[in-house]
Image (cartoon, rainbow, N blue to C red):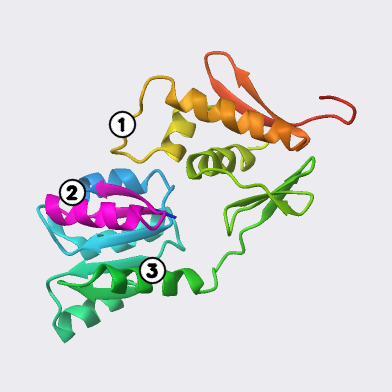
């Protein structure tokens, strides 16, 4: 799960990022509404964690903008403003849940799990190519029905390629899908992820291959029968 956390207190933001990362979640941090709006345009997040008291306004004003970018994006408001009137206002403005500070990480994780169990308004498809099947709902890859275990960044890379199957995907788009906004990308690290994913697909005889398009990016294509 990739989360956009809108929080202006650096210590709180970092504590949440570290805590959620330990549970396998990738967290991007936006310290104000302006940068949150920019991040929402990327449409790469599965959940919005939203503080109300931001330097440039009330965070709940972002809910409508978030839904304009991604209609089904769940929103949990995290705030010190925990009165009944504040909670009702936040929920009426479209928040899916409202958690008053201070809170325990365990409670936030439980709220996230609860939202994740809700039926999606749009059924996410699976894509079949060669012997590979990718399930967008669970973000899992299968070869002839058997799970293909992959590290998290390789799963994110494969997801970005599969949803554009047969089309060239620009390198910048793939970097955005694989790395958090604040992640330091070491030299050649991304290419190493591509190489390892390519090898994993080849070793599994997946019937698909990742091709490099010089100066542009990569594409995932289904291999014709007898090729490979």
Residue wearing tag 1: 184
Q: Quadrant of residue 115?
A: bottom left
- Give the quadrant of the C terminus: top right
Q: Which residue lies furthest to the right in this view?
A: 226
Label 1: which secondary element: loop
Query: What's the residue at 13%, 52% (across, down)?
Result: 11
Total labels drawn = 3
Q: Which residue lies furthest to the top in this view?
A: 214
Q: Specify start and end residues of the magenta stretch as a single range.
A: 3-29
Q: Sequence order check: which comes first, mark 3 or mark 2?
A: 2
Q: Sequence order check: which comes first, mark 1 or mark 3?
A: 3
Query: What's the residue at 78%, 35% (across, down)?
Result: 207
Q: Where is residue 75 in the image (x, y as percent from the top left)?
A: 34, 66
Is 17 one of the magenta-colored residues?
yes
Which numbered tag is attached to residue 112? 3
Q: Position of residue 172 (x, y in %)?
A: 44, 28
- Give the quadrant of the N terminus: bottom left
Q: Is residue 15 at least partly visible in the picture?
A: yes
């Amino acid at each position: 799960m990739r989360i956009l956390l809108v929080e202006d207190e650096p210590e709180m933001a970092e504590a949440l990022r570290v805590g959620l990362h330990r549970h396998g979640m990738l967290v991007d941090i936006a310290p104000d509404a302006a940068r949150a709006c920019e991040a929402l345009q990327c449409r790469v997040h599965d959940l919005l964690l939203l503080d109300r008291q931001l330097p440039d306004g009330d965070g709940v004003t972002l809910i409508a903008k978030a839904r304009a970018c991604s209609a089904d994006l769940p929103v949990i408001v995290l705030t010190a403003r925990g009165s009944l009137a504040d909670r009702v206002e936040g929920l009426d403005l479209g928040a899916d849940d409202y958690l008053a500070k201070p809170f325990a990480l365990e409670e936030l994780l439980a709220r996230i799990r609860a939202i994740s169990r809700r039926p999606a308004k749009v059924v996410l498809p699976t894509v079949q190519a060669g012997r590979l099947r990718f399930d967008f709902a669970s973000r899992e890859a299968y070869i002839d029905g058997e799970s293909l275990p992959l590290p998290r960044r390789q799963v994110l890379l494969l997801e970005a390629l599969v949803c554009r199957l047969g089309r060239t995907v620009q390198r910048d788009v793939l970097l955005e899908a694989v790395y958090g906004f604040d992640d330091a990308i070491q030299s050649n690290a991304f290419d190493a992820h591509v190489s390892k994913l390519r090898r994993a697909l080849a070793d599994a005889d997946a019937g698909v291959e990742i091709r490099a398009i010089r100066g542009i990016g990569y594409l995932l294509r289904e291999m014709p029968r007898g090729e490979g």
